[in-house]
Image (spheres, coloured by chain):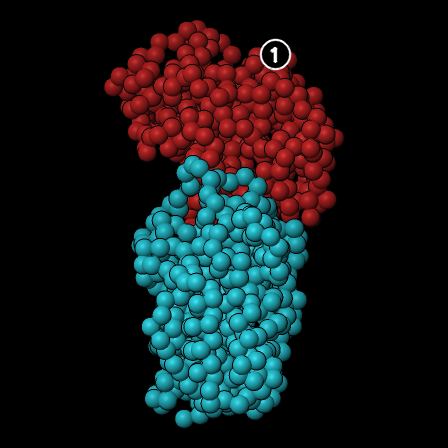
Chain colours: A red, B cyan
Amino acid sequence: MTWNRVAVIGAGLIKMGELFDQSYEQMAKGAFDAAVGSVDQGFDPSLIDAVFVATQRGTLWGQEGIGGNTVPWALGLHGVAATRIENACPTGSYAFRVGCMAVASGVHDVVLVIGVEKMRDKSSEEGLLARAAAGHPIYTRGESAPVLFAPFATRHMHEFGTTREMLASVAVKNHHNGVLDPYAHFQNEVTIEQCLAAPPVCSPLHLLDCCPQTDGAAAILITSAERAAEFSDRHVYVAGFGVATESPYLHEKQTFVGLPATTLASSRAYAMAGIGPSDIDMAEVHDCFTITEILDIEDLGFVEKGRGGIASIEGETAIDGRIPINTSGGLLAKGHPIGATGIAQLTECWWQLREDAGPRQVKLRNGFALQHNVGGRGSGVSVVNILTRNP
Amino acid sequence: MTCWIRGIGVAAGGWRLPTKDVNAAWGRPGGRGQSAVVAADEDALTLGWAAATRALDAAGMTPEQVESMWWGTSRAPFGEGPSWTHLAATLRLGPTCGGTVISGSTHSGCDALAAALDALESGRLATTLVVMSDALNPAVGGSLEAVAGAGAVAVIVGSTGPGARITGTGSVWAPVLDRYRGDSEDETRDAYDGRLFREQIFLPLMGKAATGSDAGRWSIPDPDGRMAATLGQRIGAAEVVSAPSRSELGDCGAAATLVGSAAALGATGPISLLFYGAGRATRFDLDVDSAVPGAERSQVDLSGGRLVGYPQVLRSRRRLVTTGESVEMAVPPGSAMFVRGNHETLGFLGGRCTKCATINIPPSIHPTCISCGATEFDEVALARTGTVHTFVINQTMPQPFEAPLPLIVTDLDDGSRIQLQGATDGSDIAVGTRVEAVLRRYTIERGVPIYGWKFQPITTRAEVAS
C-alpha cells in the first residue's frame, strides 16, 4: 500500500457536559484552541489547508443540515477547504479516517478534524427520544436508541449467562475512570448496587447502563509523518484504520451476541497496522450502553466471545488490568456528543501514547492504542482507528 | 335462494371496564357489571380483522376464496376513507374481491348481512364474508359510556350449506332520533329520553319486526341492559340467547345481535335474530341444520380481557390528554411511503428469493436478497406465528408512545425473522416464547389511523382453534 504516513500533532477537547451556556460555535472554538495549544512547538492555524467537521445532527439544536462552512468560519479559518461528515455514532472516528486519507494521499498537508455536537439544546423528549417515531412506520416504530442495543443484552444473558451485575461492572469502572478525567461529563463513582437499583430505561438496560446526553467538542490536528517534526516532540502516528457495515435493521441481524461489523472493521485495521489484538495497550471503545462495551471487547478480539461480562467484572479491563478499556470514562461517564465522541477518544489515545494521561496512565508495552465506534440504525457501521508511538 | 351461515368468529375488545368505576367518577351510586372496551391500540377494524380471521379458519376457507366482504360498523375507523381496503388488505383478500363498508348506525351490521344475501341472490357469486364490529367512542359522562361494548363478529355466508340456513326476514322503520353523532362530532351520545326510547321506539318497533317468527330462541340487542328481557317476554321468547354476552361485554352496537347468537349457533334448531339501529328494526330467522363451525369456541374468544380503570379508558379514547407536543412519524400518512408500502405492511408480506428462498422483509426495501444478492423474488404471506429470539421493553419514549412497550425480534415459522412491537406489557414474553402476530392500530397520526402487526403470546384461545 502506498500512502504517506500520517502523524497526530495536536489534540484537545472541552469539558463535556450539559453546556447550556455555550453555542455550537463556542464549543468548536474551545476544542480548536485546546488542540492548537497542545502542539509541542506551537502552531499557526493558517497552516491548516483542510477541515473535516464531524457533526451527526443539527436537528437537536434547530439546524436541518449543517454545511462544512459553519465551523471554519466560527474559528476564523476563512476560505479554507471544508466539509461536514456524518456517519451515525462513528461520525467523529470516520471524519478522522477521511482526514487521514486526505493527508495520506498527499492532497492536503495539514488537516483539522473537529467534532462538535449539541445534544441538549432540546429536551430529550423532543430530541434523541423522538427518534422512536422515525424510520419505518411499523417495523421500527418505538426504536429509541437503547432499543438498538438492549436486544443484544437480552440474548447475551440468555446464551452466556451474562448478568446485570456484569453489565453494571462496566458502568462502575467507567465512572471510576471518569472521576480521574477532568473532561468527563460525570465526576462521580457509582456502585453495582446503584446500577441494579436504577430505574429501567429499556429492559434489560437500566439508567446507569446508558450513556448521558452530552454536549461537547474535540479537535485533532494531523499532518504527514515527514512534517511531524516541525510541530511535535513526541510523535504519534496513525498505524491503521478499518470500517465495515452491516444491515441497518435489527431483524436482519445474523447474531445478537456480537456485532460482526466490528470484527470486520478491526480485522482490516489490524491488518493495515500489521498487528493483532494482543498488541494493543489500551482501547477507547464504544460504550453507549454497558452491553456495547462487552460486545466490543469480544468483537475486537480482546476477550473470547461470551467472556466479555466475566472479564469486565473481574477487572481485566480496568486501568491496571490486562487490557485497559475506556480510561477516559468512556461514553458512559465522559459522555457521547456524537460527532465529537470519536475525536475525544482519539485524544485520550494520543495522551496515553505520549504518557500524558496522569492518574489514568496505562503501562505501555507495545505502543499501540485502539479507538472504536459503532452505530447507525441497528449498529450497522463500525469504525476502528489504531494509533502508535512507534516510529 | 337459500343461504347458509357456514362459519363464525367473534372478538371482543381487550379491556374490561367496571360500570361502577364510570358511575363513581360522575358521582352516581352503584352500577352493576362491566363492558368490553378496546385497548389503546384496538378499534373496530382490528376487532373486525380478528373476528374475520377466526370465521375463515372455522369455515376452512382461504382469504382468496372470499368473493365479497360486507362490513357493517356504526362508525368506520376512517370516517371518510379507505376502511374497507385496509380490512381487506390485512385479511389478504384477493384483488377482485368486492363488497363495501356500511356505517351510520347500529343497524349497519344487519345491513351488511342483507347486502351479502342480496349479492348471493344475484347468483354472481357463491361465498361472502360478513363482518360486524363496533368500538364506540361514547360521550364522556353520558349514559352510553357505562353500557357501550366493543366487539366484533364475522360470518361466512354462502349459497350452499351446511350450517345455519336463513329461512326468513322482516323489517320495519320509523323516522326517529335516538343514538346520535353529528357530522362534526367525535363522540356518540343519546339524543333522547330513555323512557321515551324504550316505550315509544325500541319495544314497539322491535315487537313489530319480531312478528312472523315462532322461534323459541332469540338474540336481541339490549341498549340499557333491561330492554331485551322485556321484549323477550312480550314476544314469548323461550330463551334470550344474547344475555350472557351482553353481561360480559355490554352492548356491542352493530355487532351485538350476531355476537349474542354466536354460541347458540352451535346447537341445532330455529333461532331468530333481531337487529336495531336508528329507527330500523329487522328480524332474520335461521334454522341451524348443523352446528356452525366456530360457534363452539365463541365463548372462549369473548371471555377474559384485562380489567382497567376509567382514566385509562379515557386516555385510550383521547379524552384525557397530556399537555405538550406529540412526536410525529417521519412521513405523513398520505406520503408516497405508505402508497408504496401499505400493501406489504398491512398484508404482512415478504419477498422470497427465487434462488435461495430467504425471505426479505419488507420487499420494497430489498432490491437484492440479504442472503445471496439475487434480485428475483416471489411475494409471500408471512407466517403469523413464531418464536421469540430476543426482545426489549422500552420504558422511555415521548408522547404518543406509552410505556412499557415491548419490541420483539421473532423467528417466524416460515424461517424468516421480523421485529414488531408487543401487544402486551411484555411481562409474558421471554426468549423462546411462542408468539402470534395480531393486527393493532399503531397510532393515529395527523388524524389518520395507522395499522400494523404486533406480537402476543399464543393464547389459550388460539390453542382452542388449532
Q: Residue furthest bottom?
A: B1
Q: Residue furthest top?
A: A41
Q: Eyeballing the image, is B114 above or below B318?
A: below
Tag 1 subunit: A
Q: Assign the C terminus of chain B to one quadrant of the image.
A: bottom right
Residue pictured at 38% horizontal, 54% vertical: B186
Q: How many marks?
A: 1
Q: Tell me if I can see residue A304 in this picture.
A: yes
Q: Eyeballing the image, is B276 above or below A369?
A: below
Q: Where's residue B25, x and y in %? A: 55, 48
Q: Eyeballing the image, is B370 above or below A287?
A: below
Residue pictured at 57% horizontal, 83% vertical: B237
Q: Assign the N terminus of chain B to one quadrant of the image.
A: bottom left
Residue pictured at 30% horizontal, 16% vertical: A77
Q: Where's residue A156, x and y in %? A: 66, 45
Q: Tell me if I can see residue B405 in this picture.
A: no
**Badge 1, how many Cα within 10 Å: few under 14, some, many 20+?**
few
Q: Which residue is mark 1?
A: A358
Left/right placement of residue A197 relative to residue A390 reads right
Choose between A308 and B200: the one closer to the eye: B200
The amino acid on which the numbered mark 1 sits, given as a three-letter code, is: Gly
Q: Where's residue B417, x and y in %? A: 54, 58
